[in-house]
Image (cartoon, helix red, strand yellow):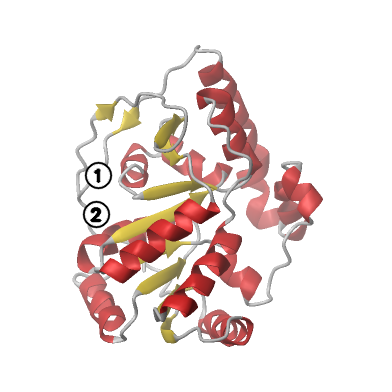
Amino acid sequence: MATDVVPIDLTVSPSGGKRNVLGVLVDVIDYDAAVDRVIEAAVRRRPFILTALAVHGVMTGVGDLRHNARLNAFDVVAPDGQPVRWALNLLHAAGLRDWVSGPELMLRVLWRAAVEDLPVYLYGSTQRTVDRLAAALTLLIPGLRIAGTEPSKFRAALPGEEVEIAERIAGSGARLVLVGLGCPRQESFAHAMRPLLGMPLLAVGAAFDYHAGLLRPAPRWMQRAGLAWSWRLAGEPRRLAHRYLVLGPRYLVRLAAQAARLWAPAAPGPAHRPAELPPV
């Protein structure tokens, strides 16, 4: 389905709001503000979509204008990883002291969800992973209610299938959804589901595998140095080589060009119509 893409202009303010990073609108936001916005939407039963984008996520927008427009329709695009935080500080003097890691944000949201008695739905990955994840989370967070789990189908939706998924989620009694489909599938899914669900959807990527005990996070010093990518590359070299050895340098070149005002990337206007057959 065609997407109307209209470049929009953003003014720069000292703090808060969205900023243009290579044409993708990334929020100047920290953990506390992100958690507050998610929980508020869950309590009020409002549609809300959030993703935490690292370099790979930003570059998916750079390489696909229609996907970029979907990203720019998100309520919150959090800076996941040092290179995206650095970009906000370099380009827009954002003053961010920390990035917003998807796995860490997921845990902080779930602790608040347990306190507020907001049931959670886990969507994505494999049945084995979501089963392990649900068990691990209920042990870690007292009072957390898992309303339901559903693994990915690893394909595009059949006509009307996204409506059926939304009905299952709503029927479970869930008040927020965690989506672990991997980038960019999870962002396309969350964007397509936003009109169908009166609750937040959080695209959290590899957080499912981390909290299910299937992946080990990089040491904190490597994360702070912006070297978490090398840790992941060492663990999955075949799958992640293109992401880190090709897209990473392209990101840095474009970032340098934007910072030097040699390139002024247009930020596509937000796409309000979802992909015709989103990934499920």
Residue under numbered circle 1: 271
Q: Position of residue 254 (x, y in %)?
A: 54, 25
Amino acid found under the numbered disc labelled 2? Pro
- The one nearer the camera, 65 or 80, is 80
| Residue sitting nearer the eye, 185 or 132 | 132
* 245 horizontally vs 3: left or right: right
Left or right side of 112 for 249: right
Q: Which residue is mark 2?
A: 274
> What is the quadrant of residue 155 in the picture?
bottom left
Q: Are marks 2 and 1 in contact (CB under 8 Å)?
A: yes
- Look at the numbered disc 2 and give the secondary structure of its residue: loop
Viewer-side residue, 270 vs 60: 270
Task: Name the amino acid type tagged 1.
Answer: Ala
Q: Position of residue 116 (x, y in %)?
A: 42, 76
Q: Residue at x 55, y 58 (%)?
A: 102
Residue 184 in sight in this render: no
Specify the quadrant of the image occupied by residue 218: bottom right
Residue 173 image position (x, y, % from top left): 31, 84
152 shown above or below 225? below
| Residue at the image point whose x is 21% and y is 42% from the top | 3
**Left or right placement of residue 57 versus residue 165 in this view:** right
